[in-house]
Image (cartoon, helix red, strand yellow):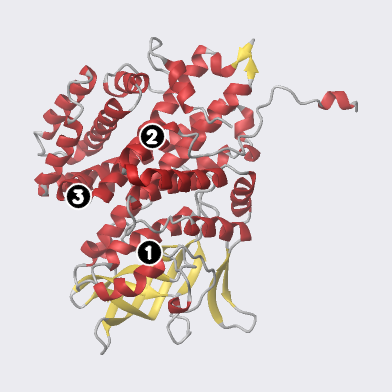
Amino acid sequence: MAATTHTVTNQAPPLVRYDVFTADRALSEAVERHTAPELLDGVREELTGLGRSAGSAQAQQWGAQANENPPKLRTHDRYGNRIDEVDFHPSWHRLLGHAVTAGLTDAWGRPAGHVRRAAGFLVWTQAEGGHGCPVSMTHAAVPALRTDPALAAEWEPRLTSHVYEEGLRPASRKGGVLFGMGMTEKQGGSDVRANTTSAVPLSADGEYLLTGHKWFCSAPMSDGFLVLAQAPGGLTCFLVPRVLEDETRNAFAIQRLKDKLGNRSNASSEVEFDGTWARRVGEEGRGVRTIIEMVAATRLDCVIGSAAIMRQAVAQAVHHASYRSAFGGLLVDKPLMRNVLADLALESEAATTLALRLAAAYDADTEQERAFLRLAVPAAKYWVTKRCTPVAGEALECLGGNGYVEESGMPRLLREAPLNSIWEGSGNVQALDVLRALQREPQALNAFLQEVGRARGADHRLDGAIKDLLTELADLDGIEARARRLVERMALVLQGSLLVRWAPPEVADAFCASRLGGDWGAAFGTLPHSLDLASVVERARAEV
C-alpha cells in the first residue's frame, strides 16, 4: 500500500505538555481571589509546578497505565498464610506519591491550606481520578480524629505528611500514612444506623474488638481506617490500624475487590472483621456525629473531583474543536459547535467557582462560614456531581468517533463521572441532608441567604430566582417529594450569585440567562444565540 494513503491530516494534536493550573482561568482567578496577598506568590508557584506535572506526557501515561492494569487482590501467600494484600501497578504508586508529596493530604494546618489543597486536587486528578480516593480520605480523617486529642496528636502528623511510603507495616515506622473508611454494610447501605458490626470493649480504656463486615471499604491497602460499629453505648466510630505495633497483621480479611464501572485504578473492597483490634474515636453512641466531619470533607472532594473531570472534558473538547476542520472551517468557529462548547464551559466554570468558594469557607473557619457550609456542601455535592456525567458525555461527542475510542482518554472520564454522585451518599441522601439542616439549623439558612444576597441587584434573573427560592423555602411541610427540585434551585442560585460577583460579564450573563432565566433547552448547545459565546469558549481554551 502506498505510503501516501497514510498521511494524517485534520487531526488535533494531543493536549499535552501544558500547565493545567495556569491554563484554567476560572481556577487560577479563584485561587487569587481566596488567597491572602502575602501568600499568593508561593501558592501560585506551588500550583504551577503541579499543573505542569499534571499536563505532562508522563502523568498522562501514568493515568492510562494505572487504569489498564487495575489492582489485584492476594488473599494468601504461597504457603497458605492469610495476607490480604492488594497489588497496584507502579504508575498508581507514582500518581499517589506525587499527590502526597504535593501536599494534597495536608490542608488543616497550613495558611490557605484548603484553597491551595482544593486547587491542587482539582489540577492533579485531571491526570487520573482513581487515586484521588485515598488522598481524599486521608485528608478528611483529620477532623474526625481531632475529637480525640490523644489520637490526633499521634496520627495527624502521619496523615498530613508529604512523604509517601507504600507497603504494610506499623504506622509508627512509616514517614506518612494513608487512611480509608468503612461505613456501609450489605443490609444498610446509606442507612448506617442499621449497621450490625459489633464492638466489644477490652479492659484497656478505648480499646475494642470488632466483629462484622463492611460492604464497601475504600482503599483497603491503607494504613488505617475509620469505621462504624455498634458498641454497648450505640453506634460508635473506631480507628482500625491495618498492622499492629507488634508487626502482626490486624484481623482484616478482604473478601473481594469490587468490579466497578469506572474508578478502575482504585481498589474498593468487601472486608470482614473477626476479633479486629480497634481504638474508639469520640464517645460511644456518637459515631455518626464523630465521623460526619470526615464525610463533609469527602463530600467537598466529590464536588472538586467532579469539577476536575468537567474541566478536563471541556479542555479536551475545546482543544479538539480548535484544530479540527469540517464543512469549510474550524469546528470551534461553527455557531452550533460554539454554542455546545460555551454551554459546557459554563457548567465547568460554575462548578470550579463553587468548589473553591467552599474551600475558602473551610479556611475562614468562622461560625458564619461553618453555618454556610452546612447547607452549601450537600447542595453542591448533589448538583455538581450530577452535572458531571452529562458534561463528560457531551464533551466526548464533540470529538466524534475519536472521542469514543480509549486512546482519547474521554471514555475514562465518562466512566469516572458518575462516581462522585454516588460516593458519600447519592442524590437523595444529599437532598434529605439539606432538608434536615433547613428544619433543624436556621442559622445555616441565614448564612446561605446572606451569601447569595451579596449579588442582589446585579442581575434581574438572579434576583427573580432568589425570590422564587424564598417562596419555596417558606413552606417546608411535605417537602420531601420536592427536595431534589429545591436543592437544585439552591445550588443554581448559589452558582449564579458567585458568577455574577466574580466571573466575566459574558459568563455570568450566559449562566443567568440559561440556568436561572429559563432561556435554555433540555440539551447542551441550546443557549440564546445573542450571547457572547465566542468569549465564553475562548476563556475555556487550554493554551499549550
Residue 494 is situated, as x and y percent measured from the top left of the image, at 25, 33
Q: Amino acid at mark 3?
A: Arg
Q: Examine the rendered structure and indicate whether residue 472 appears above or below residue 457.
A: below
Residue at 25 percent across and 72 percent down: it is 149
Tell us which disc is closer to us: 2 or 3.
Answer: 2
Residue at the spot of label 1: 181
* Vertical comparison of 179 with 10: above or below: below
Residue shown at 49% from the left, 65% from the top: 163
- Measure the alpha-carbon separation of dots 2 and 3: 23 Å
Separation of residues labelled 2 and 1 (CA atoms)? 34 Å
- Identify the image quadrant of the C terminus: top right
Disc 3: which residue: 370
Pinpoint residue 279: horizontal percent, then vertical percent.
31, 78
- Closest to the observer, 540 or 257: 540
The amino acid beneath tag 1 is Met
Residue most toward the bottom?
Answer: 203
For this view, does 175 lie left or right of residue 277?
Answer: right
- Lower sequence index among marks 2 and 1: 2
Q: Which mark is residue 29?
A: 2
Amino acid bearing label 2? Glu
Q: Earlier in the sequence, mark 1 or mark 3?
A: 1
Residue 125 shows in the view: no
Instruction: Kindly state the secondary structure of the residue where label 2 is placed.
Output: helix
- Secondary structure category for the residue under label 3: helix
Q: Position of residue 95 (x, y in %)?
A: 55, 55
